[in-house]
Amino acid sequence: MEHETHEGTNMLRRKLIIKIKKYSIIFFAILLVVIWANYASRVKDYDDTVGPFPHSKDQANTTAHLSRLDRLYELAKWQHVLNRQFYEWKWKQALTSSKMTTAQSLDTTRSNDDLLFKYRKQRKTAKPANRYFVYSHKCKIPYADPFSSEALALHTPAKLRTCTNESDLITLSFDLKLQTYKMQVNTEVLVELDPNITQLTCSYQEVRSVKDATGKFFSVLLPPVDMTDNMALDRNISGILAECRDKKNASRIVQRDAFPLVQVIPKTSRTESHPLPRQPSVIMLGLDTMSRMNFKRTMPKTAKYVQQLGWFEMEGYNKVADNTFPNLCTVLAGGKPAQLDKVCEEHSSCPWIWRDFKEAGYSTAYGEDITADSVFTGSGNAPDFTLRPLFTGLTESMHTFRRFGYDYCVGRRLAISYLYDFCMQFTQRLIEELEQPAFGFFWSCTLTHDYHYGTSSLDGLFVDYLKTLEKHKIFGNAIVILFSDHGERFGDLVDLPDGFLEERLPMLHIYLPPWFRKTYPSYAQSLQLNRNRLSSPYDLHNTLRHILQLNATNPEDLPPLANCPTSQSLFHPLPQERSCVDACIGDHWCTCKEFLPVKLNGEAYNIVKLTLYYINRWMLVHHFNRHCDRLLLAELDHAERKLLGVDNDKETLYGTIMIYRLRFRTFPHEGHFEATVRYHSDRQILVDFDLEDISRLNRYHNDSLCINDKIARKFCFCFKEGNTNPEWQSLLINFKEGEEKSQTDSVVALEPIDVPAL
């Protein structure tokens, strides 16, 4: 009985084991089928090495529908992560090894560089971004906090200084009925100025622009004209210098002042050839060297003002060149100087946008608060009204006070006040009083260019000017554009973790008046949509063109821009998937996050030395070695590489041409540079080398006074008295046959030549 029970138990146990084996086989068979199906699906989707990678469920779901280029970026990012993890592991292994020689033998080309990298002073780098100005597959511009602890630690606000404490003895007014300017002499002010003076003799001198035999414009002061109280001025005068003297002592000047005069001849508001019922005026207010971050940091009152209804900020606005002139050329003429040379030569003048506005029936004006290094000098197709003749005459005949690197005071007024008074007269006469269409461009740099916190002294004054424009109903009739050319290029801000963005993201705010938003709602919607999309000065130029063709409701209706066919008007929706190539922004200026840091190994040092070789060669070719010292590498601070390489002008994962961005210092005199170069890994040379892709990060005004060339000054350290380099100075490179002897800054695939110790 017990034996039968035992056999029954064994049989049940065997049946259970058989069932377990059976279900296990079925389970593993199903698992193998699932694994095979998943693998087959990935192989099918992979297509030319652009499938989703790494093979995680989340990554597969997010990348399955990406384009080939986007999937290449995903692959490149993952490969970079793997490489970094591998070398971190290798370094840890080396550190824990009991024998240093063993660690060195793992990677003899890297160990010394790794030790150097560990103990060297490293560049501050931005933290991984979790917020972006622009976020798409083709472009990710990280958010830069204007009020980061690093930026605020450097923030030293400047106070506004007045040029005089005296009351105005001479004032200017405009008689609406007579349409003339009148001068007033406020004799009651004499008690305050000098109670001993009882009588005055006053006069004014007209400041006029004339042309010499060479065609160059200059300013002259005409002979003095006696002036009485409430005296009307001639309508052909554009600027005056007025003064009052003690009648008993003619050599004593009691007060001297100057005034711009915008004299307008009334005309019909619209020509027959342009039948649109209403034209928006355009007023462009520019502040030199103002990133959108520094604008919020240093001008909080103005930043708050432009947050009102009707204002639109372009957070993805990216510059296209290094300094002021090429960026403003792109906005005002649709191209950088090199792109415009042929056009300007053929037409004897450049295609400045105000020429198009003049042809459309607009009155035009242009003003700057400096005379040296100004953007527009007044030759060829000049606007109807310019401030330059008056301002040039004033700086030559009146006392000036320098601050922030420029003439801060001219006479008894701030230099910038002449500009904004000129702007106020222009807008009042034309837009408010005559309701005529007007285009005005008013550019200031005296408080912002050389000292990035000088802007804080301008904040209250500037917002008062905006409120005055509002009071005179300018915002009810005009499109107002508040913008800059670039951010801070030198100094402490550049060395911040967000310094790369500080330099390349200038501010851009556009205001649309209520009637325009109501008449063209789609254009206002497009501006709102484009707020967080990549844009460039080419797009801003197209927007100005679009204002003259408001019936161009589709992008195709606006003729493409010759120098950037893929640019668009900001009144049309920009593509969400837009790269720097689409916006005509070069790699060196592109803020889309496409670069990742690389180790400062032998290859990185070889590339930076090649960069210096090409710079020195250019200086030799153009004979600047006679005056400027040779650049040698002092330190490589930072290196990063673009995710994708290039083969046959097409981005690939393993391209032979890799794009590097380098930050380095030079000696014997310290220069601080940032360069973007294209490195041919097989031939070990730089291709398409362009000096415009190298930025100087520290100021160099006093280093390069021995030469005038704008390109060479960036790299020049003049030989000081008693300190020469005869071997370097005697070197001479002759131009190869067929090579033009021109001041070009672009050298394509230069082959190394026999130049000692470059």
Image (cartoon, grey):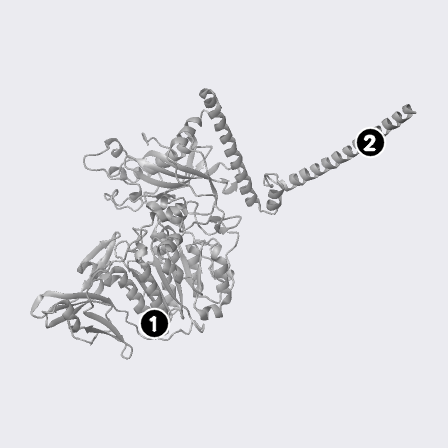
Q: Residue at left 49%, top 28%?
A: 92
Q: Is residue 149 visible?
A: yes
From the top left corner, tell me how far across and down residue 591 is, in percent.
Answer: 44, 47
From the top left corner, tell me how far across and down residue 556 is, in percent.
Answer: 51, 60
Q: Are marks 2 and 1 in contact (CB under 8 Å)?
A: no
Quadrant location of the N terminus? top right
Q: Residues within 10 Å of mark 2 (few under 14, many from 20)?
A: few
Q: CA distance from mark 2 to mark 1?
A: 99 Å
Q: Residue at left 19%, top 70%?
A: 170
Q: Earlier in the sequence, mark 2 or mark 1?
A: 2
Question: Residue under circle 1?
Answer: 430
Name the residue type under label 1.
Leu
Single out the residue that lies furthest toward the left. Answer: 248
Quadrant location of the C terminus? top left
In the displayed structure, 435 sits above or below 140; it is below
Q: Tell which of 343 and 44 is nearer to you.
A: 44
Q: Residues within 10 Å of mark 1 (few under 14, many from 20)?
A: many
Answer with left or right where residue 34 lies relative to residue 202: right
Q: Is residue 352 visible?
A: no
Element type at mark 1: helix
From the top left corner, tell me how far across and down residue 488 is, in percent.
Answer: 35, 49
Answer with left or right where residue 358 lies relative to residue 81: left
Question: Residue under circle 2?
Answer: 16
Answer with left or right where residue 394 lies relative to residue 103: left
Q: Nearer the viewer, mark 2 or mark 1?
A: 2
